[in-house]
């Protein structure tokens, strides 16, 4: 009973004392506040995944499978847009990587460009799995990375189920097509067998024809050798003729020049005779001189007459020679024309032979591609090489005949010009003969007159009338002589022109015959190659016949095997890689940014911040934050006396915690020195906050500190990402110091982003300065109230 009475007294005291009652009532709500806040904040974080920002990079270029276009990357993106499991942001690779580094995205999912391409390798010997690249930033939030792992596995299962269904459908379709294709192949092999049998009969006929062509090519080659010898002899005669025509041309040019000078002298002589007639009186005085001159004229005319007669005798021979040249050139031109037609026909035949050989080559290539027997393929290839050599020789023959045809045309043109020049030469020689006849007649009359003149010099003085008559006769003879001389000059001029054409035609004929000789030599060589190629074709056709026989047997066997293969198509089995591709077509490639090695390292920033805050709070229980050890002189000294002790405890707490975590627990950090400094800054910040609350409010301050701790545990994003907690709590995130301690610890422990660490350290120092100034203000006011009044 006494115990019950004492209990009732205790209750009465609590109710009567507000300072005790209020803290007791507040403590009653601590369990529900702590548990309720955690349950409310973290009760269903997976129910708000649509708020978690995740970048998606689709680089898939698509592919084709059995004629159908596959765009698995695009389909996956469309599926993500519909389901909205996370806050998907579809960006390019650069923006995604920058966002991941700058803490905009918790993770990045990248679909590579060969994603669909790898899906089509299911039928390859070594299929390649599709890679879905997953890039979490574990240093930003370890639990977000864990959530991402589950999400990516779910995506893997969804895409894998779709692909497995597609693979199964395609597999059964291909099996059906395979059976149908094998049956069709069997029928085609039968047709191939029938075609090869026909080709074998054709090969036998080909061999017989090639043997005949072989004999004809040898006759053609012997005829070409004889033609080449004849062309060489023609070329030698024409070359000699061209040299002689040059000498004849030079002689005619000299004769033409002499005739022109003779004609000029006769004109001057006629002019002088006119003056002589006009001056008959003066002639008497110079009769002696004229007698001497006439005697010399008579002697000279006799010599001139003798030379003229010789020229006149040779003129018919020159005309006959010119006529023979003209006739020979005409016959040569006609013969060359006929020869050119024959060469053109030969050229056409050679081109047809070359075309036939090319068709034969194409047929052999097709047969080589169709046959599968190695021996047959080798025999066909050897035959193909022989036909190729024969085709090359035939092309050379065609080329030589083309050049020969072109040279024959040029040679015919030269012969035509030679015929024309020789005709003009004949006309010139005829005119020359007529002029010479007249010139001889005039010359004889002139000689007679000159003799009369010499004999009648004595009678000159007896009568001028007789002299005048003789002078008239002399003038008439001179006139005839001048006419004959003019005709002679004209004939020689025509003869000289004809000789130029004769020389040009002869030169062209010689040049054409030289080209003809070269062409005949090429023709002979080409026909030699042609004959050799025909012989090889004959040998190859025999091999072709043997090969076709073997191919016939092989095609029959192929038809039987394909038929058996169609029956056994259902027994085809895949290997382990194919089975694995069917079961697990997608492989996840985890490219972690700032990898966190274990769970302890991931939650270290959160629990270290919690431990430092709780350690600062417990200090207030064992150490009085208000009462000084002695009377302080000022409020500032009062503050520093308490603050110095708290700083010492904070530093010691930090060093002990860091030492055990680093050396005992084995946590790995990016920089030990920065880690220790940041731990001290965090501890001092929490210590100054709790000093302010407990110093100013005492026990209610401790209660308020516990409430702040509970709020920080849910809003600092130390566990789940901020986006997953209730929206009502999210605004508190930026106003509580543990937010920045957790972020700073993640930087120095995991990411190594020291700039971000110092940024958070600066914010914590700002909090600390505010708390210190507020506490100093309180101690200053309290010092004035308590110790200044006492003084």
Image (tube, rainbow, N blue to C red):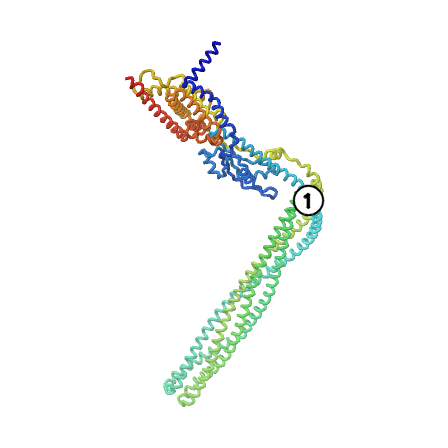
Residue nearest the viewer, comparing 324 with 537:
537
Q: Position of residue 507 (x, y in %)?
A: 52, 65
Q: Is residue 194 visible?
A: yes
Residue indicated by mark 1: 185
Tag count in the figure?
1
Q: Quadrant of residue 115?
A: top right
Residue nearest the viewer, comparing 557 with 358:
557
| 614 left or right, relative to 385 | left
Compared to residue 489, the image places residue 542 above or below, namely above
Q: Position of residue 395 (x, y in %)?
A: 59, 55
Secondary-structure class at tag 1? helix
Q: Quadrant of residue 218?
A: bottom right
Compared to residue 120, the image places residue 299 above or below, namely below
Q: Position of residue 658 (x, y in %)?
A: 43, 22
| 726 left or right, relative to 531 | left
**Neighbours of disc 1 within 10 Å: few (<14), some (14-19), many (20+):** some
């Amino acid at each position: 009973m006494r115990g019950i009475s004492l209990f009732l007294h205790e209750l009465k005291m609590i109710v009567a004392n507000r300072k005790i009652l209020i803290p007791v009532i507040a403590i009653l709500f601590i369990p529900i506040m702590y548990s309720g806040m955690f349950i409310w904040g973290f009760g269903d974080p997976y129910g708000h995944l649509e708020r978690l920002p995740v970048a998606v990079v689709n680089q898939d270029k698509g592919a084709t499978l059995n004629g159908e276009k596959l765009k698995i990357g695009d389909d996956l993106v469309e599926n993500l847009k519909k389901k909205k499991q996370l806050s998907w942001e579809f960006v390019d690779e650069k923006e995604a990587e920058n966002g991941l580094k700058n803490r905009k995205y918790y993770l990045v999912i990248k679909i590579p460009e060969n994603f669909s391409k790898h899906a089509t390798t299911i039928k390859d010997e070594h299929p390649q799995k599709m890679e879905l690249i997953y890039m979490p930033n574990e240093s930003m939030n370890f639990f977000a990375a864990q959530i991402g792992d589950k999400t990516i596995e779910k995506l893997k299962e969804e895409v894998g189920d779709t692909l497995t269904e597609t693979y199964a459908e395609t597999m059964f379709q291909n099996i059906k097509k395979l059976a149908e294709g094998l049956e069709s192949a069997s029928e085609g092999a039968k047709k191939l067998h029938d075609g090869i049998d026909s080709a074998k009969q054709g090969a036998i006929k080909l061999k017989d024809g090639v043997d005949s062509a072989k004999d004809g090519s040898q006759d053609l080659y012997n005829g070409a050798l004889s033609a080449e010898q004849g062309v060489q002899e023609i070329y030698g005669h024409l070359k000699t003729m061209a040299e002689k025509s040059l000498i004849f041309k030079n002689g005619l040019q000299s004769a033409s020049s002499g005739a022109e000078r003779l004609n000029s002298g006769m004109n001057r002589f006629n002019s002088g005779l006119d003056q002589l007639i006009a001056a008959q009186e003066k002639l008497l005085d110079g009769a002696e001189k004229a007698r001497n001159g006439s005697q010399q004229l008579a002697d000279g005319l006799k010599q001139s007459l003798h030379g003229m007669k010789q020229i006149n005798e040779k003129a018919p021979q020159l005309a006959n020679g010119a006529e023979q040249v003209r006739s020979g050139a005409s016959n040569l031109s006609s013969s060359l024309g006929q020869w050119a037609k024959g060469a053109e026909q030969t050229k056409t035949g050679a081109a047809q032979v070359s075309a036939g050989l090319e068709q034969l080559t194409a047929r052999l290539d097709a047969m080589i591609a169709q046959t599968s027997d190695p021996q047959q393929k080798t025999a066909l290839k050897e035959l193909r090489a022989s036909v190729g050599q024969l085709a090359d020789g035939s092309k050379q023959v065609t080329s030589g005949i083309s050049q020969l045809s072109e040279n024959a045309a040029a040679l015919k043109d030269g012969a035509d010009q030679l015929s024309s020049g020789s005709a003009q030469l004949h006309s010139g020689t005829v005119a020359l003969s007529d002029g010479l006849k007249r010139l001889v007649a005039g010359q004889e009359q002139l000689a007679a007159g000159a003799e009369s003149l010499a004999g009648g010099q004595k009678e000159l003085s007896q009568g001028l009338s007789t002299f005048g008559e003789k002078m008239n006769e002399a003038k008439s003879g001179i006139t005839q002589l001048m006419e004959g001389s003019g005709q002679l000059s004209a004939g020689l001029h025509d003869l000289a022109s004809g000789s130029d054409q004769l020389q040009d035609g002869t030169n062209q004929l010689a040049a054409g015959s030289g080209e003809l000789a070269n062409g005949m030599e090429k023709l002979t060589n080409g026909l030699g190659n042609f004959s050799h190629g025909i012989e090889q074709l004959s040998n190859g056709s025999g091999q072709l016949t043997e090969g076709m026989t073997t191919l016939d047997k092989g095609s029959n066997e192929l038809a039987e095997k394909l038929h058996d293969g169609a029956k056994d198509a259902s027994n085809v089995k895949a290997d382990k890689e194919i089975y694995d591709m069917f079961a697990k077509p997608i492989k996840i490639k985890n490219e972690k940014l700032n990898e966190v090695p274990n769970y302890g390292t991931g939650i270290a920033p959160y629990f270290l911040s919690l431990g430092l805050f709780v350690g600062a709070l417990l200090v207030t229980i064992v150490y009085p934050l208000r009462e000084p050890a002695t009377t302080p002189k000022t409020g500032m000294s009062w503050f520093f006396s308490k603050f110095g002790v708290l700083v010492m405890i904070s530093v010691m707490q930090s060093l002990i915690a860091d030492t055990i975590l680093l050396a005992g627990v084995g946590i790995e950090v990016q920089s030990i020195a920065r880690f220790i400094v940041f731990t001290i800054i965090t501890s001092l910040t929490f210590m100054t906050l709790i000093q302010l609350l407990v110093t100013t409010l005492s026990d209610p301050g401790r209660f308020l500190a516990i409430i702040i701790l509970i709020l920080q545990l849910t809003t600092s994003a130390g566990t789940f990402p901020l986006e997953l907690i209730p929206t009502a709590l999210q605004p508190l995130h930026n106003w509580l110091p543990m937010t920045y301690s957790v972020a700073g610890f993640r930087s120095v422990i995991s990411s190594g982003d020291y700039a971000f660490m110092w940024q958070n350290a600066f914010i914590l120092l700002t909090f600390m300065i505010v708390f210190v100034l507020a506490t100093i203000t309180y101690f200053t006011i309290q010092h004035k109230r308590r110790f200044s009044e006492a003084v």
